[in-house]
Image: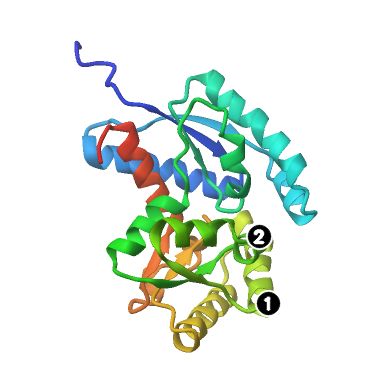
Amino acid sequence: MSDRPLKQKTIGILGGCSNIATGEYYRFLNESVNERLGGWDIAETLVAGMNFGNIEAFVRQDEWVGLETYMRTKIDSLVAGGADVVLCVSNTLHKSLESLMSDVTLPLIHIADPTGQAVNAAGHKKVALFGTRPVMQMDYLKDRYRDRFNIEVITPTDVEQKDIDQIIFDELVKGVLTEKSKARYIEIAERIRKEDRAEGLILGCTEIFLLIDQPDMPSFPMFNTAKLHCDAAVNFALGKK
């Protein structure tokens, strides 16, 4: 037993936003580690779960200061618990993360970075972005994709954004998946592909892939931020590029 316990870094998961996404992250992380190591091995993880009711209220009321104060308590718990890296399961909450992590000794794997790398690897320069309203309306993710990866990000119309956001908050974060909502997402994606000449689609909410994913539009590349994020975290945890 001299090789046990197996050495790997502990992935600190800032979760609860939503619990559905957090569960999928936990699945992705463990499946990815097991695929690489085999046997019974899975990831070393530490979860700080937030109450999504608090997150929803802060985001809906555009109360980012209160949200950041709340998130910081959870980040501190990951630090105190011995995490080696922080992974936030929400695209939306990355608006606050860089400033919150500025005086934290742990590294942050930013959700946009593995996605930007994947878009670059695929050779695309102009992609659409689906997500919550803050993700689609604010510039914090679009700017990162542009500045770090030279990717132009385009977003749906105001009416389309309203529908995308409503489906996320009223259905996806509760695990509700309907054919009507899938059809609406595909309709919007088709329009933005044809009219705006998008070369691909970033699934910029970590529950969206449960509703639409690559098989639904085989000729329109989709980039699942949740899966790409988890793969990057596993690379970090196992010390691989």
User: For residue 40, what is the image quadrant?
Assistant: top left
Residue 46 percent across, percent down from the top left: 49, 28
- Is 157 or 144 nearer to us in this picture? 144
Q: Residue furthest top?
A: 2
> Which residue is pictured at 41% across the width and 44% down the height?
27
Q: Report the amino acid beneath label 2.
A: Pro
Which quadrant does the C terminus fall into? Answer: top left
Q: 82 left or right of 40?
A: right
Q: Residue furthest bottom?
A: 195
Q: Measure the alpha-carbon separation of dots 1 and 2.
A: 12 Å
Q: 14 left or right of 223?
A: right
> Which residue is pictured at 47% across the width and 45% down the height?
110
> Which residue is pictured at 40% across the width and 45% down the height?
230
| Sequence order check, earlier mark of 1 and 2 | 2
Q: Can you identify the residue that label 1 sits on?
A: 158
Q: Report the amino acid beneath label 1.
A: Asp
Secondary element at tag 1: helix
Density class for disc 2 (Cα within 10 Å; few <14, some 14-19, many ≥20) is some
Residue 139 percent across, percent down from the top left: 60, 61
Mark drawn on residue 134: 2
Residue 225 percent across, percent down from the top left: 44, 56
